[in-house]
Image: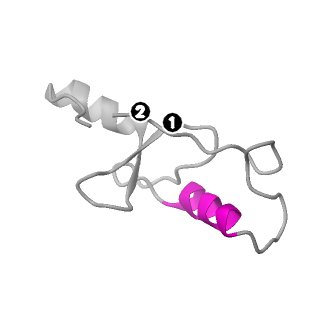
């Protein structure tokens, strides 16, 4: 399973810093502000995350999912 990261606003691959009407910027910002399904904190920028395949559209921090896998002995599946 591959992780993703979201580039900071205003950087080469990140969304616009200010208000804009770009659909890609809106989606990136939506994902960054989405809450991790495990810890409840926002996904944020520059942080590895996974899409929670059990719940399409839900995101989880890679560190949270990897910690659960470590504690339970269950591997992270693609």
Side of 5 where 24 appears, left or right: right
Mark 1, other Cα within 10 Å: few <14 / some 14–19 / many ≥20: some
The part of the chain drawn in magenta is 23-34
Q: Nearer the viewer, residue 71 or 11?
A: 11
- Secondary element under disc 1, as helix, strand or loop, is loop
Side of 43 where 57 appears, left or right: left
Q: Is residue 67 magenta?
A: no
Q: Nearer the viewer, residue 53 or 34?
A: 53
The span from disc 2 to disc 1 (Cα, nearest Å) is 8 Å
Look at the numbered discs 2 and 1 and tell me whether their residues touch, using CB distance below 8 Å: yes
**Extreme left residue here?**
73
Q: Which residue is mark 2?
A: 63
Q: Report the disc number at residue 48.
A: 1
Q: Is residue 44 above or below residue 18?
A: above
Side of 65 where 29 appears, left or right: right
Q: Position of residue 61 (x, y in %)?
A: 43, 42
- Secondary element under disc 2, as helix, strand or loop, is helix
Q: Nearer the viewer, residue 65 or 21?
A: 21
């Amino acid at each position: 399973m591959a992780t993703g990261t979201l580039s900071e606003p205003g950087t080469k691959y990140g969304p616009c810093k200010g208000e804009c009407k770009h659909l890609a910027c809106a989606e990136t910002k939506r994902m960054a502000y989405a809450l991790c399904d495990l810890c409840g904190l926002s996904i944020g920028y520059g942080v590895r995350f996974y899409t929670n395949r059990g719940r399409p559209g839900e995101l989880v921090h890679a560190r949270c999912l990897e910690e659960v896998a470590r504690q339970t002995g269950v591997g992270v599946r693609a």
